[in-house]
Amino acid sequence: MEPPTEGGWNNSAVKEYYFDDYKSAGFTCIRIPVRWEKHTMENAPYTVDQAWLARVEQVVDWGLQRGLYIIINAHHEDWLKQNYSIKSYRDRFDSIWAQVAFRFKDKSDKLLFEILNEPFGMSVQQVNDLNQRIIPIIRNTNPTRIIIYSGNDYTPSGALMAAAIPKDNYIMGYFHSYDPWNFAGLGQGTWGTASDVNSIKAMFQTVAQWSARNNVPVMISEFGAVKSCDYNSRMYHYSTYVSEALNNGIAFQVWDDGGDFGLYNRSGRSWDEIKDILTKTYPQGPTALTASVVNDTNVTLKWTNRTSSGSGIRIERKTDAGQFAGIAALSPDAASFNDTGLEPGKTYYYRVVTISNSPADMYSYPVKVTIIPKNRSSYKGIPFDAPGTIEAEDYDIGGEGLTYHDTDPANVPGAYRPSEGVDIEARPGGYQLAYVAAGEWLEYTLNVKQAGVYTITAYTASMDGGGKFRFEFGGTATQALTVPKTGSWTTLVPVSIKANLSKGLQIMRLSLVAVPSFNIDRFVITSDTDASVNEEQAQVPMFSVYPNPAGNHLNVRFNSTVNDGTVELYNILGELVKRDKLNGGTTTLQLNNLSKGVYFLKAVINQSKPLTQKIIIQ
């Protein structure tokens, strides 16, 4: 509830069912950030809008009614932080807390008050003054409610320990940590060395010692790592924070903004993998889990056991769309496992479970590993000719890590090649790449007819423009091209760049450099030194087939008028199994009598060069 208006930052207004999901997932404490600025008069008596107070109370009650601990605070109150030296600003904040405290004075002791989130820009002395002034205001109506205070800045642990400790019997201190920021906040590099882990351990141990010495309970009320982080590093990072918080008796809340740090899909009522780390991690559970590919079909897992009291070890595995299930039972002292018979091109997820009745089964964090295939082939059966036209969706066959990389394992639109991770959607007359993300890439095998300078033209569409991509040939990259705004996801404009290509077979990589998002329909490669070839190539009508994989029918559509032509379907043995005459722009082939498998479609149009495409019948 911290944006200027509730639901203003890509999350809808709070729904009651959130708290059902929080409780059923195993959580016991929910921190609700609240922004009061836009709901409070700017002049004395600084009255808080009663409708807003009622709304906050409604949300708080939803949590309390389910037996959850609830924290509310003053969040994103930059007006105060930037003007703390001005008395009227301090008076306004005092008034806000006086009204909030009075409104909630009769609530359960499971409601906690946090004075101010991250007092960035305020000095140590100013934060000390703030804490010493607000606590008595709250105590006027809430004599025993727990009040949570902090140090200054972005509230690292050192700031908490440097702050003056308020003289009060019902206080807790809080700190935040997104350390190291280059990894956790920016998604750079990897994390998980002994030095990385020891740094987090030292932070928690230092805070715990300070807490015991001063008799002040402590919580870490924000930590996390963005989703763009290396997956296995991110899982280990969260697990280390949870383990060390538990080891040192420090309560914890993770930051969930519904975006880069998101854990709970509020509309879909589903959870990120981090949920199980938060609810199933124990300090005695297995840790330091790694997965490495031994060969095309084998993965070796290694981990560190932190207890000898378990009755056994269970290995669990899943694929992208599946749920974790046990695949092996091992002795309690086992520290490695070799998984065999895996499928190249697939991504597998593993976790290790120490079986225990006290306190419960103890889970490691998950790790993932992709079995990168060794073999590639052209999607249409033969490499693309250059000069020529390439449909962007016809990247090479091979799989994740070999012929493409996509940040999301699912083909979100699923209109074409639905079992692969590249996002492909339908467009008028065919398909196009969509939902692109920075860091993704696709590869195409080319047969360059002669060495020379070529122009590569990509046909792109973008609502906003500004996205960037480039081509790479043999490790040499072109300059990045900027996608212009077309105001539509299907209105195409050409974007071109020149490249010096050697003769023969080679790989063209399309690298997606930056968003805003854009779509790509096709590439046209023309020779700057052989205009006759360009003209001949331009006369070949472009065509598309859909759906592919196909069921009981297949549509063959051409982007220009077809006056004369045939389409033939061959099985994997090269045997002709079906032939039809082409009429007009679209021809439908009935496939009811054909067996499942791989086929090759050959189309001859207007006596031009034959066009081929690989077809899968399911």
Image (cartoon, grey):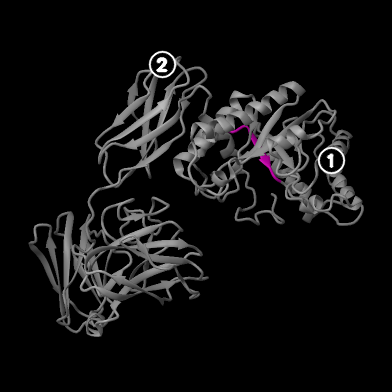
Q: Is residue 126 above or below residue 384?
A: above
Q: Secondary structure at mark 2?
A: loop
Residue type, mark 2 in image: Ser
| Side (left or right) of 197 relative to 36 | left
Q: Nearer the viewer, residue 156 or 379?
A: 156
Residue 457 horizontal/vertical position (percent)? 36, 75
Q: Is residue 31 magenta?
A: yes
What residue do we see at 19% from left, 84% from top?
Answer: 563
Residue 311: assigned label: 2
Which quadrant holds residue 434?
bottom left
- Can residue 262 be seen? no
Q: Is residue 184 above or below residue 426?
A: above
Residue 186 horizontal/vertical position (percent)? 55, 49
Q: Is residue 485 above or below residue 41?
A: below
Q: Nearer the viewer, residue 454 or 95?
A: 454
Alpha-carbon neighbours of circle 2 within 10 Å: few (<14), some, or many (≥20)? some
Query: Bounds of the magenta span?
Result: 26-33
- Can residue 336 be seen? yes
- How far is the residue under mark 1 from the one under mark 2? 54 Å
Which quadrant holds residue 592?
bottom left
Q: Is residue 401 above or below residue 275?
A: below
Comes first in the chain, label 1 or label 2 = 1
Q: Is residue 517 magenta?
A: no
| Side (left or right) of 500 relative to 2 | left
Which quadrant holds residue 324?
top left
Residue 560 horizontal/vertical position (percent)? 27, 81
Residue 125: assigned label: 1
